[in-house]
């Protein structure tokens, strides 16, 4: 058995372990025997059943999906922009999604006061607004990338645009009545446990579509590593590939941001951890490794944020920041070349 095969087996086992641990660990510890009893239909404890199926299970599923999605989108951004510090959070894609959601959520009370809005319509509105916001930011960055050859200038531009979007969001928060603000403020801190059972199909379907597109793009991403000119001579339609990368990124980062809030540092840090682990830039290995690592690390961050034994959960962003910032510092200090 090759080294990569052993790594993938260990990663797959790791996903299962942290998924089960995320079900067990929380403010109230659920014994594994009780979880198995509920899943097999042999438990009559309605409280445990409700806690598991309505809260813990959706949160664990979302944690795995969000980790894989943000890692895949980050890897795509780093390859397309040929910049090890690129990612949906750094380039402002997540900020654009946040702006779209802010406009929708903070404006929704104006309409809901005079009409009843079904939850399904609300969910579609949240996703759609996140997609539109992230699309606009990504379009601006992509347009600038065709004119700017300096990858650091593109990175700084994305950060400035993202900061501008964040400033607009803060203005909306300031102008919004207090009674309408609480839900949005909690959302901005990042939360994996806010997804309901009715929202789970939305986030699952669109995230899986984005991940499938990422897998389809593996060969074009490998060719982009060698430069756009080489990719063109290999018969790759650069414009089509960019559109697909942007579509996948919008589906992945936009959907996760819509329901979980802006989760930072996962998209930029996880691909680098995967590179260090497998010592290979081939996306046939790197892409699935990044997805699996993300599906391990984000649930692990969620477990750490739970503070077992206390009715308190830290915002997931605080944990991902503590995980991602040291990695970014190491990348900058060592100035490693990954491409």
Image: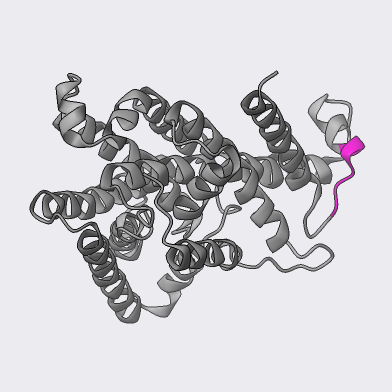
Give the left or right position of residue 5, taking residue 273 as reference.
right
Q: Position of residue 3 (x, y in %)?
A: 66, 27
How many marks can you see?
0
Colouring method of the image = one colour
Which residue occupies the extreme left position in the image?
Answer: 147
| Residue 11 in the image: above or below residue 167 | above
On screen, residue 68 above or below 97: above
Magenta stretch: residue 59 in it?
no
- Which residue corresponds to the image point at 85% horizontal and 31% vertical from the top-left? 36
Q: Residue at x 45, y 66 (%)?
A: 188
Out of 21 and 37, give the one closest to the viewer.
21
Quadrant hosting residue 312: bottom right
Regarding residue 122, the answer to whether it shows in the image is no
Q: Give the image location of residue 301, x and y in percent.
A: 65, 56
Q: Magenta span covers which residues? A: 29-34
Residue nearest the viewer, comparing 329 with 131: 329
Asked whether 269 or 319 is in front, the reply is 269
Q: Where 162 falls versus 290 (above or below)?
A: below
User: For this rendering, which residue is in front, 241 or 105?
Assistant: 241
Vertical comparison of 173 with 265: above or below: below
Would residue 259 be found to the left or right of residue 142 on screen? right
Q: Is residue 252 left or right of residue 68?
A: left
Q: Quadrant of residue 274?
A: top right
Quadrant where the N terminus sits is top right
Residue occupying the point 53% across, 61% down: 327
At 41% from the left and 51% from the top, the residue drawn is 258
Q: Quadrant of the C terminus?
A: top left
> Position of 192 compared to 145: left or right?
right
Expressed as whole percent of the image width and height from the top left, the position of residue 240 reads 18, 28
Q: Is residue 210 at all visible to an observer of this figure?
A: yes
Is residue 33 shown in magenta? yes
């Amino acid at each position: 058995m090759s080294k990569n095969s052993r790594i993938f087996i260990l990663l797959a086992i790791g996903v299962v372990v942290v998924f089960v641990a995320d079900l067990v660990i929380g403010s109230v510890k659920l014994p594994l025997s009780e979880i198995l009893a509920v899943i097999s239909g042999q438990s009559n404890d309605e409280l445990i059943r409700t806690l598991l199926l309505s809260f813990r299970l959706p949160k664990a599923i979302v944690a795995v999906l969000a980790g894989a999605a943000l890692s895949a989108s980050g890897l795509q951004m780093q390859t397309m922009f040929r910049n090890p510090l690129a990612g949906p959070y750094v380039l402002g894609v997540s900020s654009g999604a946040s702006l779209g959601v802010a406009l929708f959520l903070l404006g929704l009370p104006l309409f809901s006061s005079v009409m009843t809005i079904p939850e399904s319509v609300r969910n579609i509105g949240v996703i759609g607004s996140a997609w539109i916001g992230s699309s606009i930011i990504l379009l601006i960055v992509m347009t600038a990338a065709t004119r700017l050859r300096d990858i650091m200038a593109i990175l700084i531009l994305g950060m400035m645009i993202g900061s501008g979007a964040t400033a607009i969001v803060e203005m909306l928060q300031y102008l919004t009545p207090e009674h309408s603000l609480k839900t949005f403020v909690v959302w901005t801190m990042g939360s994996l446990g806010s997804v309901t059972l009715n929202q789970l199909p939305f986030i699952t379907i669109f995230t899986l579509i984005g991940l499938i597109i990422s897998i389809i793009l593996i060969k074009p991403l490998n060719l982009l590593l060698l430069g756009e000119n080489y990719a063109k001579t290999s018969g790759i339609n650069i414009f089509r590939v960019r559109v697909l990368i942007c579509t996948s990124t919008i589906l992945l980062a936009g959907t996760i941001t819509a329901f979980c809030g802006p989760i930072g540092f996962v998209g930029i840090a996880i691909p680098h951890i995967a590179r260090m682990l497998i010592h290979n830039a081939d996306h046939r290995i790197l892409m699935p490794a990044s997805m699996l690592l993300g599906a391990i690390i984000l649930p692990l961050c969620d477990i750490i944020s739970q503070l077992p034994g206390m009715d308190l959960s830290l915002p997931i962003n605080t944990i991902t920041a503590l995980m991602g910032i040291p990695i970014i510092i190491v990348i900058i200090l060592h100035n490693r070349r990954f491409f």
